[in-house]
Image (tube, rainbow, N blue to C red):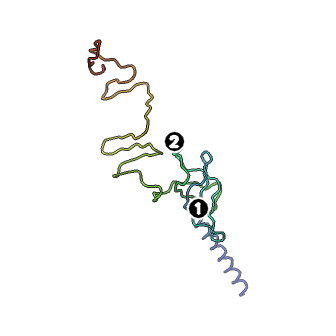
Amino acid sequence: MTDIIVRELLSLRKSIDDLERRLAASHMTGKVVAIDGDRVRLELQPEDSRTGKPFLSPWVQVQEAAGSTGTHFPVAIGDPIRLFSPNGELGSQSIAIRDGYTDDAKNPAKNGELVIAHGRCALRFENGVAVIEADDIIHKSKNLKHNEKNIGDTHTHGGVERGGSNTREPNE
């Protein structure tokens, strides 16, 4: 009888160990150390207790929006990432999810504004004002209007005279 109880307790302990391992592996934090197209490898925390070396994830996809509204926000080496593995096993079902701000990856917003930032470019939206920050801005469109007036490459002006005089505002 005692042997049966011991075996059952050992079996339960093994199951608990497996569940604890899977739970610990279901959400891990780290940073991007390699990029290959839409896939990344992560250096995960904490370090391997046996070797003292960082633990590298398998190649995994970075989460993006897909379908009728899609996005592609590239990641960079060193970006903070959370690895989500729903069943607690690192592998093909794991997905990399952008993590929160850190000392090395600070919040690009200044005062609660909405910001989309990448490299040396940013779009900032606050209190009815949209600000574009970039080294260069290239605008391509069929039509370009400002306050309902055509200011694109097909616009015309009235009051054109020879010489250096000013013209009137653009025509409709």
- Which residue is found at the position 35% from the left and 27% from the top? 145
Residue 137 is situated, as x and y percent measured from the top left of the image, at: 43, 34
Binning the other alpha carbons within 10 Å of mark 1 as few (below 14), some (14 to 19) or many (20 upward) gives many
Residue 166 is situated, as x and y percent measured from the top left of the image, at: 26, 19
- Which residue is found at the position 40% from the left and 42% from the top? 123
Callout 1–callout 2 Cβ contact below 8 Å: no
Q: Is residue 81 left or right of residue 165?
A: right
One can see residue 155 in this view? yes
Nearest to viewer (mark 1 / mark 2): 1
- Nearer to us in this view, 57 or 34: 34
The residue that label 1 is drawn on is: 44
Residue 62 is situated, as x and y percent measured from the top left of the image, at: 57, 50
Instruction: Tell me the kind of residue under disc 2.
Output: Gly
- Nearer to us in this view, 77 or 62: 77
- Name which of mark 1 and mark 2 comes first in the sequence: 1
Q: CA distance from mark 1 to mark 2?
A: 28 Å
Is the residue 78 above or below the residue 67 in the image? below
Instruction: Tell me the kind of residue under disc 1.
Output: Leu
Q: Residue 25 sits in which quadrant? A: bottom right
Q: Which mark is residue 134?
A: none
- Disc 1, SS: strand
- Disc 2, SS: loop
Q: Residue furthest bottom?
A: 2
Binning the other alpha carbons within 10 Å of mark 2 as few (below 14), some (14 to 19) or many (20 upward) gives few
Quadrant position of the N terminus in the picture: bottom right
The residue that label 2 is drawn on is: 70
Q: Is residue 107 left or right of residue 2?
A: left
Q: Is residue 77 left or right of residue 148?
A: right
The number of callouts visible is: 2
Q: Residue furthest top?
A: 162
